Amino acid sequence: MLTDTHSHIYAEEFDSDRDEVIARAESVGVGLILLPAIDNESYDRQETLAMARPDLFRQMMGLHPTSVGTDYMSSLSVAKAKLYDEPQKYIGVGEIGLDFYWDTKFRDEQIEALETQFMWAEDLKKPVVLHLRSSKDGNADNDAYATIFSILEKHPLVHGIMHCFSGTLNDAHRAISMGFLIGIGGTVTYKKSTLPDIVRDIPLESIVLETDAPYLAPVPHRGKRNETAYVSLVAEKVAEIKGVSPDEVANITTGNAKKMFFDD
């Protein structure tokens, strides 16, 4: 069975054909789809989808770093209320993290929001799903991975997934040593991607598969809308790199996801 550990299939991009998208995912063997939250503009859409197919979807709750702005405390209060009122409904705290790629105006607020949500995860004993993007200008002060590791040092109980991994091999090994799985998606198929070298060097037991649909579609669909069925292409690429069968990749990575989110 394949698991897509990161899909925004509740997004507006799928409003015209969501049922067909789900059917295509199931047709290639996807049996579990994890839904990361973004902000209070999408929480209701996410919940409606998760409630419609509880056999297929599991949802998370959190505030995405690019949604952290001047009113972030109000946004956090909405997410916290949902998470604490019905903790059994959510398998993790996510999608949370640091995004310095386009703008660092709310850098400090992002860090404060992240640490607040880390405290929720610690309190409720739930894993986190981290979104990490460094500044595109290469400013060392805005390296999301260096920043996250310094924060995680203060929160040793926090564990989870580093979604859409874009760090170095050293970052990957450090993340794994701190209790994180490495989220591998469509970028592993891109010609100039460094992910194949990282996948080659880390154990399959430290990897989960994802799409980040509707974003970052794998080759040969790059540049088009991504969808959960394409997680099978990610599995095939990882299998090629590792020299194993796609079925083995599917089974091991699904087991990794289940252990992270569902094992006590």
Image (cartoon, rainbow, N blue to C red):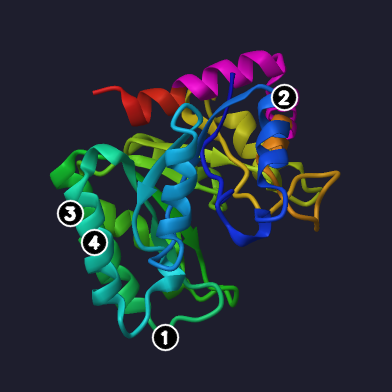
The magenta segment is: 233-255
Residue behind mark 1: 105
**Residue beneath the point at 58% across and 39% down:** 210
How many neighbours does mark 2 have within 10 angstroms: few (below 14), some (14-19), or many (20 or more)? few
**Amino acid marked by disc 4:** Glu
**Amino acid marked by disc 1:** Lys
Label 2 vs 4, first from the N-terminus:
2
- Taking the image as shown, residue 134 lies to the left or right of residue 96, namely right
Q: Secondary structure at mark 4?
A: helix
Label 1 vs 2, first from the N-terminus:
2
Q: Quadrant of residue 16?
A: bottom right
Residue behind mark 2: 27
Residue behind mark 3: 119
Q: CA distance from mark 1 to mark 4?
A: 18 Å
Q: Secondary structure at mark 1?
A: loop
**Residue beneath the point at 25% across and 40% down:** 126
Q: CA distance from mark 1 to mark 2?
A: 44 Å
Q: Quadrant of residue 249?
A: top right
Percent x, y for residue 173?
Answer: 45, 38
Q: Nearer the viewer, residue 3 or 187?
A: 3
Q: Which mark is residue 50?
A: none
**Amino acid marked by disc 2:** Ser
Percent x, y for residue 264?
Answer: 23, 23
Percent x, y for residue 221?
Answer: 83, 48
Determine whether label 3 and label 2 are within 8 Å by CB: no
